[in-house]
Every structure is written in structure tokens, then in C-alpha cells.
Image (spheres, grey):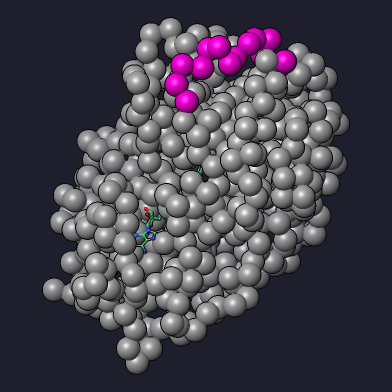
Amino acid sequence: GKKVIIVGSGIAGMAAAIRLSIKGYEVTVFEANSYPGGKLSEINMKGYRFDAGPSLFTLPEQLEELFELANKKTEDFFKYKRLEINCNYFWEDGTKLSAHADVAKFAEEVKTQLGEPAENIKKALNNSAYIYRHLAPLFMHRSLHKWSTWFNKKALSSYLRMGKLGLFKTMNKANTQQFKHPKLVQLFNRYATYNGSNPYQTPATLNIIPHLEFNRGAYFPIKGMHDITSSLFNLAKELGVHFQFNQPVERILVKNNTAKGVKAGGKSYYSDFVINNMDMVTAYKTILKEEKQPERLLKQPKSSSALIFYWGIKKNFPELDLHNILFSNDYEKEFKAIFEKKDLYEDPTVYINITSIHKKDDAPDGSMNWFTMINVPNNQGQDWDTLKIKAKEFIVRKINTTLNTDIEPLIEVEQILDPIGIETKTSSANGALYGNSSNNKYAAFLRHPNYSSSIDKLYFCGGSVHPGGGIPLCLLSAKIMVDMIPKA
Ligand code: FAD
């Protein structure tokens, strides 16, 4: 049979393996780590379990599609539920908002707490849905780099609407126009961080994101986020995909401008197609270093990174939900620090994800597993050992003042992940979470295509290439890519 080799078992690599196996290929995945999933892994320590990376699950149908394609029942592999509360938001002045998934309820809450007309929420989310309707078919579901994407009626009608789609103003500008209360502007500006961007720079087109959370829904996998990795891994194995762990690929073998296979552990392995799921910037610097470099794409600014404290907390906080945000008092300054000064901000927005709310056995009785995260610049050689200590002080102060507590004595276990850790664990260039940032209006066009334009039989998928980072887009990258490869 015809063979495919995939470099990397991130979720896009596994989705590609599943799709190609269904297309009739014999698939082998080479993975540098001893485990699958890349950024979507888990941590176990002293009775606590943490999802190490992603915590928000949207567009579950992208995952379901893989089980259906394989003629399996999703629920035999993977179960999930829709959240009733998307997120709890807290401010230091005591203001608290629960973002109910039910838009009418959320609008009511916003009216009571902030005096914002309920109408404004509904209008904003309708606008968000409008952007999605016009852009998703063009930017998310197809290769941007094939002429056929541009020469069709739907695409044409989208260009004509670019203004209304928000390409020519920033997200912050659009949100300032659509909401009266600054806290609501802040809340909606935060969606830029869902792909590691800056709301004061990124085009308002990114207001597409609240549509995913409110209109399409935020979900929780019953066994935790890591079950996305486990269930894809199990499906791939059932389909006969071979996995080679602890096998970092050293080079992609290229002859006569055609990919021939890979070299790993000093040995050569040959295949009909090679697929790269590793971060593409790192890939060009390492396993493709002898090949022509796409200079312009490699230089694109990267998304932000994260500093995460995985804390076992020996107390129950009834005011907290699965997703919680403790907002900074000055959001603009926070983003200036992250994206311009490439530094920490002293009053950071703190995100706390607590899976033990829904999955009790993730923490001992009476305790909670806190995934405590702040957005930080990507790694530019800062002194992270010093920054980690400073960040912890900032975070602890923020938590104590906002939740009226003394958190440090309650921390029973701790592990820390910084941008360098993200880089070493997953080869992500600069430890960026989502590949390129979307901070300028051309970003969508400056992602690496899902194929190589100079090397035949070489394809790309994952968060650093088209259509971008985050679970749903990574899964879509595998789909767009496999659609370009003929049946075996
Ligand atoms: P990656 O996960 O980047 O994996 C690439 C794989 O390739 C790794 O396993 C790596 O070991 C392997 N590899 C690298 N080099 C080699 C080599 N030479 N040989 C063999 N194998 C190699 N997304 C969301 O949707 N929601 C969220 O809430 C969210 N939050 C996030 C929070 C954090 C802290 C992080 C880090 C990410 C978050 N993301 C989130 C983004 C999401 O995790 C990523 O976009 C997605 O998991 C990337 O998948 P990928 O397929 O690109 O591969």
C-alpha cells in the first residue's frame, strides 16, 4: 500500500493520520515525546490532575466528524457536554458577571450589573454571527492559497463586505462603538487572546470569536480536555496507524524537489507523502534547514505565550466555575507590556481553570485543581526564572484582592510552565501558543499554506499554518490538507 509519514502527534497530526488512514494509506506518526497530543497533554501530581494546555473546547463537530468518517459512534470514544456558564468574570471593585450561555440570560445579567442595554449584547452577537457566516467558508474551511478559493461567488461577496466585517478597524475600536460600559468592552476585547493577539491592534474581524462561544457553545469533555487527545489516539490506533514515540525526526528527506521520507535515530524511512505537524518555523530551522526557506512567512510576529501555575488548592471556592477571569484594572497597559515591552504587567488579568468543578476526581475532596494562567510575551530571551517569581507575586496579589482571600498558604502542590517549557515540550517557536499572531489585517494571508510550494509531496498541518491555532482550526488544517491529497 501507499505510505504516509507524519512528523508530530499534535491533534492536527492525529486528525491527519485518521483521515489519511481512512483514505487508504498506511500511516506512521513519528513523535519526539513519549506521549501523544503535543500541547494538549495532562499533568498528574499528588491526587490532582490538570489539563496542561488548552482548556476551552468549541466546535465539537470538528472532532465528531473524525469518528463519523471512520464509521464509529463518537460517544463510544468521547463524551462531552455544553456549559451553562461560559465564564465567571471578576473585577477588583467587587463587580462580578456570569456569562450565561443563554444569551437572553447573559444580556439580562449585564443590564442588572452594569446598566448596559440588553439590546447591545444581542446586536454584538448578531454581528459576530454575521462575520462568521461570511468568513468561515472562506478562511476556515478552504486553502487560502488555491485560486479556486478566490474565484467563486461567495468569496466575491465577502470582499465587498470587508468594511462591515471589521477588517479596517481594531477590535477595541469596534467594541467601544458597540458597548457603553468599559467593563463590557474589556470582556469582549479579551476574545483577542483566544488566538494570542492584542485587541488594540487586531482587526475587529476577530469579533468572530464570541460567536463560537455564545452562539455555537462552549463545551467540556466529560473526562477533561486531555480526552480529546486520548480519543483521537485510540481511534487512530484502531484504524491501524503506527505511532513511534521518543523518535524525533532529524530531517525530512528531499530528492529532486520531492519529499521521500524522514530520517530519525540515524535511520531513513521512506514514504509516498510526508506531513509536517511540527511548528513550521522550527521545522524550517531544523528538519528542513537545507531547503528553500519561506523568509517572509518565517518572520511574521508570533502570538503571545503563557505562564501557568498548576496549583492544588486545599479549599473550596463556591464563587468559582470552570472558567474564571480576574480582570486587570488597566487592560490597555497590560497589552502594551505584553506586546510592546515584551514584559510582564504588574496587575495582570488572571485566568483560573478548574476542571474539578465538573470532574470531581481531578482533585481530592474539599480541594480544587487550579490551572492559573496569565498571558505573557513569547520568548525573546527574557530572564524567565526571575519573571516567574515576579509573576507569582502579581498573581497572588490579584487573587487575594479580587477574591478576598489569602491564597498562598492554600497551595498544596505546584508546577510551573513558562514559555521556554512550552518551547521545549512542543517545539513551538518562541513558546507561542497559537503560531502567528493576528495583530495585523494581513495575518490570515501570511500563514504558511497547507502544502509546500517548492517541495512536492510535502504537506503541513497544525497551529502554525493555515488556518491558524486553537483546537478547531488545527483540526480544520488537517481536513483542508488531506483534501489536497489523492486517495491511496
Ligand atoms: P502541537 O500540539 O504543537 O504538537 C506538535 C507535536 O510535534 C508535538 O507533540 C511535538 O513533540 C512534535 N514534534 C515536534 N518536533 C518534532 C520532531 N522533530 N519529530 C517528531 N515530533 C516532533 N486552543 C484551544 O482551542 N483552546 C484553548 O483554550 C487553548 N489554550 C491553550 C493554552 C495553552 C497553555 C497552550 C500551550 C495552547 C492552547 N491552545 C488552545 C492552543 C492549542 O493547544 C494548539 O493550537 C494545538 O494543540 C496545537 O496542535 P498542533 O496539532 O499544532 O500540534
334 sits to left or right of 134: right
Residue 410 covered by magenta stretch = yes
Q: Residue at x 25, y 38 (%)?
A: 77
Numbered disc total: 0
Q: Is residue 471 above or below residue 155?
A: above
**Which of 158 and 423 lies nearest the eye of the viewer?**
423
132 sits to left or right of 341: left
409 sits to left or right of 118: left
Magenta span: 401-414
Residue 419 picture location, percent across and down:
55, 47
In the figure, residue 89 lies in which quadrant? top right
Q: Quadrant of the C terminus?
A: bottom left
**Which of 278 and 460 lies nearest the eye of the viewer?**
278
Residue 390 picture location, percent across and down:
67, 33
**Which of 116 and 456 lies nearest the eye of the viewer?**
456
Q: Is residue 283 above or below residue 215?
A: below
In the figure, residue 234 lies in which quadrant? top left
Residue 194 covered by magenta stretch = no
**Which of 89 and 269 lies nearest the eye of the viewer?**
269
Q: Can residue 382 be seen from the camera position used here?
A: yes
Q: Can residue 174 be seen from the camera position used here?
A: no
Q: Is residue 121 above or below residue 254?
A: above
Q: Residue at x 29, y 41 (%)?
A: 230
Q: Is residue 277 above or below residue 328?
A: below
Q: Residue at x 38, y 41 (%)?
A: 41
Residue 454 picture location, percent across and down:
46, 85
Q: Residue at x 81, y 33 (%)?
A: 330
Residue 142 picture location, percent across and down:
49, 65
Q: Quadrant of the N terminus?
A: bottom left
